[in-house]
Structure formats: C-alpha cells, structure tokens
C-alpha cells in the first residue's frame, strides 16, 4: 500500500510541477525596449493647402528606429493607406524634428471648412516593433494664420524636417470627387 501512495503522490507532484513551472514550455520572448515617442505636438487647425508640421521626439535604447508610419482618417470618407517616412541612420537612437505634410491634394480642388481628419503617427524599428501611437486631430478652417509658440522641447534648438507625408485627401463634397 505504501508503494501505491508513493506512486500516486509522485504523479500528483509531477502534474503540479508540469502545470506550474514554465520550464520546458515555449515562452514568449521578453519585451525588448522598442521605440518610444516621448513628446509630440501639432496645431489642430489650418487652411486647405497649408503646410502642417507634426513635431515628434522619440528614442530607442537599441538605436534601431527605421521608419515612421503616418495614417489619416477622414470623417465621412474613412481611412487612407499608411504613408511611410524612412529615417536616416543617425536618427536610429534618438530623433527630434517634424514631419511635413502639404495639405493641398491633387485629388481635391478644395476641402470645405469644418472637414475633420485625424492623423496617427508611430515609429517602427528594424525588428518590426512599433512605438506608442500619437494622435493629432485637425480641422480645416480658412482664415487660420500663424503658429502658436512651440512647446518644449521643440522650442529649443534645431527641429529638422524628418521627411514628407504624402497622403492625398478627397473632398467630402461628392462633386469634387467625381462621384
């Protein structure tokens, strides 16, 4: 009888060890520190055809940031394909600057006042890890002039252009869309 109990307890112990110990099981790789956008800023309104500057500061401990993803959602028209801005090698570990988007579109002769869009920006590293996403709402308004003072850290030192965003908007006015 003792031998049966020993076998039974051994079996129970093995089952407990098997289910409670992660050893031997395929485990997800621990998260490596990927890119992180630490600061971001953009004005929230401007006239159609204006140059919109999206300021970002980002870092990557491993120094492998390679591209910026920019996507746009437009109220009433939906989601536009992602536009990729490829970074220079010197921006792999740290960057501070702006993305430039010339809001004039070859697919719309005009964008009516009050048209709202949302731009989402994130950074991807060499391994494919994506940073946190920053979201910038924007409303088209004629007559908007001037840029408010830039917040820190963009008010200090140089803010180089990191690249251009190339997304052509459609007008929500169906007559300019050819529908």
Image (cartoon, rainbow, N blue to C red):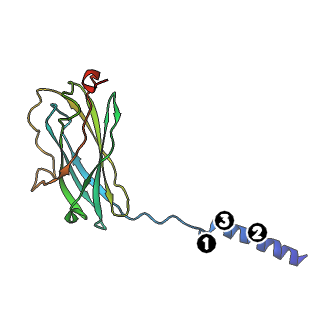
For marks 3 and 2, give the one nearer the viewer: 3
User: Callout 1: few (<14), some (14-19), or many (20+) C-alpha neighbours within 10 Å?
Assistant: few
- Rendered residue at 13%/36% (across/down): 50
What kind of element bears circle 2? helix
Instruction: Judge whether 91 appears above or below 134 on screen.
Output: below
Residue farthest to the front, as pictured: 178
Q: Give x and y (percent) for residue 110.
A: 19, 27
Q: Give x and y (percent) for residue 104.
A: 17, 35
Instruction: Judge whether 96 appears above or below 121 on screen.
Output: below
Q: Earlier in the sequence, mark 3 or mark 2?
A: 2
Discs 2, 1 touching: Cβ within 8 Å: no
Q: Earlier in the sequence, mark 2 or mark 1?
A: 2
Which residue bears the numbered disc 3? 19
Quarter of the C terminus within the rendering? top left
> How far apart, in angstroms, are the residues tagged by discs 2 and 1?
18 Å
Residue farthest to the right, as pictured: 1
Which residue bears the numbered disc 1? 24
> How far apart, in angstroms, are the residues tagged by discs 3 and 2?
11 Å
- The numbered dot on residue 12 is 2
For marks 1 and 3, give the one nearer the viewer: 1
What kind of element bears circle 3? helix
> How far apart, in angstroms, are the residues tagged by discs 1 and 3?
11 Å
User: Callout 3: few (<14), some (14-19), or many (20+) C-alpha neighbours within 10 Å?
Assistant: few
């Amino acid at each position: 009888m003792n031998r049966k109990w020993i076998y039974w307890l051994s079996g129970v112990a093995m089952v407990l060890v098997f289910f409670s110990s992660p050893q031997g099981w395929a485990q997800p790789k621990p998260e490596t520190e990927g890119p992180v956008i630490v600061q971001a800023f953009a004005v929230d309104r401007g006239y159609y055809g204006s140059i919109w500057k999206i300021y970002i500061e980002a870092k990557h401990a491993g120094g492998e940031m390679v591209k910026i993803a920019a996507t746009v959602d437009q109220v009433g028209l939906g989601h536009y394909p992602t536009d990729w801005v490829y970074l220079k090698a010197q921006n792999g570990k740290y960057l501070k600057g702006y993305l430039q988007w010339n809001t004039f579109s070859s697919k719309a002769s005009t964008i009516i006042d009050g048209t709202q869009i949302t731009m989402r920006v994130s950074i991807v590293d060499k391994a494919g890890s994506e940073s946190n996403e920053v979201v910038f709402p924007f409303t088209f308004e004629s007559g908007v002039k001037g840029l408010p003072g830039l917040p820190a850290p963009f008010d200090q030192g140089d803010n180089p252009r990191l690249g251009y965003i190339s997304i052509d908007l459609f007008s929500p006015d169906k007559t300019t869309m050819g529908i």
